[in-house]
Each structure stands twice: as C-alpha cells, then as structure tokens.
Image: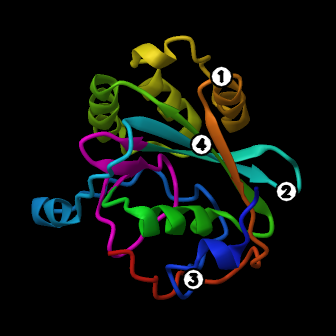
Amino acid sequence: MPLSRRALLGRLGAASVLPLGLSACGGDPVWASEDEVSRAIYRHDGPPAVMLFTMISNRSEEGAHSGLMVNASQRVIFDPAGSFNHPQLPERNDVFFGINAAALDFYIDYHARVTYRVRTNEVSISAGSAERALALVQQAGPVGPARCNIAIVEVLRELPEFRAIPNSWFPKNTMNYFESRSDVRTALYEDDSPDNRGDLMRAPRVR
C-alpha cells in the first residue's frame, strides 16, 4: 500500500528538500574519514538482503534513477550517480553508511515527490552474497552520470542469486526483473510534496 508523506516522516520531523535532478551530480569522488564511517555503522537484525529502489516519473512512467540497499554485516545504500546526501550519513563514493530505519525513510522521502514515486523490491540472499555485495558497492564508485542502473546490475551479476539478471541501463527493466521473481517483497511510496523545494535545508536527524 502506498505510504503518505506524513506517515513516511513520522519519525523524522521536518521534511527533506530535494534538488531538481534525481541524478544530477554523479561521478565526483567523496571519501568520508574512517572515524566518521566507524561511528555511523549500523547493523540491522533482518536477514541478509538487497533492496532495489526505482524512482519512477509520474509524468512519463519511465524509470528516472536506481539505488540499492545492502544488508550484510552492516547496512548501506549505494546511490550511484545520485544527488542524495545527509550530513549524518557519511559517504564514500556513492555508498552511504549508517542506514537505520530513519535513514532509510529519509532516503525514500528524498526521492518521492509529486512528480516521482519510489518502488522498492527486496530479495533475501545468503550471508556470503551479502558480504560480496557490500564489498562490490564500495569498489564501484564514484559512478558517472546516467550509469546508475548499469552500475547496480554489474554488482548484482556477481552474486549467485542474480546471475540471470539482464544487462540494462534502464531502471524499470531491472525493476521488472526483480518483480518477476517469486521471492521478492515489493512496496510503493508516494508523496504529494512539490517537485521544486529549493536548496537542501536542514535535514532531520537520523542518528
């Protein structure tokens, strides 16, 4: 069931503010310090898994951007060629650390707005595959503009559970592959906030 913006932000307080482009600033190296990363690490008690995020245009129905969350010995989000950021979530080349429940909600709300909805597809994988995915996303960035989906596919094809995933530059193709699987868990998030919310204002706390 789609979640309203109000429900999605129940734990977060003030809303995030999204720049106009969903993937406007990919390719720039970012490297948080070891201390920042160590302090942010979050270990989720759910099963090892990957979650695909697909940002879909409500105007054209085309996929606009892809992201990938990996739950392994820690939980991270790989946002290749994306514009996402949060002052409490250290980044190393498109990988964000410290993805607790509030941070996950913030990531979804950051992308969901009147012109875009967010669809998530989660698949449980082996612990070994999850650790492999965690290592691969940390090696993949920074990812250049427009390469968000192909960068995610290249990571997933290295895992036994996803050897059959088709190569594609298009987010909805990868989403459709996930949704063809019998082991997928899917959710949809919609938000009626304005498309242009100006510059990123003070972000709600996620720690």
Could you tell me which quadrant the C terminus lies in? bottom left
Check if mark 4's residue and mark 1's residue have beta carbons within 8 Å: no
Residue 92 belongs to magenta span: yes
Mark whose residue sits in front, 2 or 3: 2
Residue type at numbered disc 3:
Asp
Q: How is the image coloured?
A: rainbow
Q: Which residue is mark 1?
A: 182
Q: Nearer the viewer, residue 16 or 26?
A: 16
Element on which disc 1 rests? loop
Residue at the far left: name it: 35
Residue 109 belongs to magenta span: no
Q: Position of residue 7 (x, y in %)?
A: 65, 75
Q: Which residue is mark 3?
A: 199
Q: Which residue is mark 2?
A: 58
Mark whose residue sits in front, 4 or 1: 1
Q: What span is in magenta?
A: 70-96
- Decide: is 126 above or below 138: above
**Residue visible at 59% across and 19% down?**
167
Which labelled disc corresponds to residue 146?
4
Q: Quadrant of residue 71?
A: top left
Residue type at numbered disc 2:
Asn
**Pointer 2 or 3: first along the chain:** 2
Residue type at numbered disc 1:
Ser
What's the distance in space between the residues labelled 2 and 3, CA to CA? 22 Å
Q: Position of residue 154 (x, y in %)?
A: 46, 24
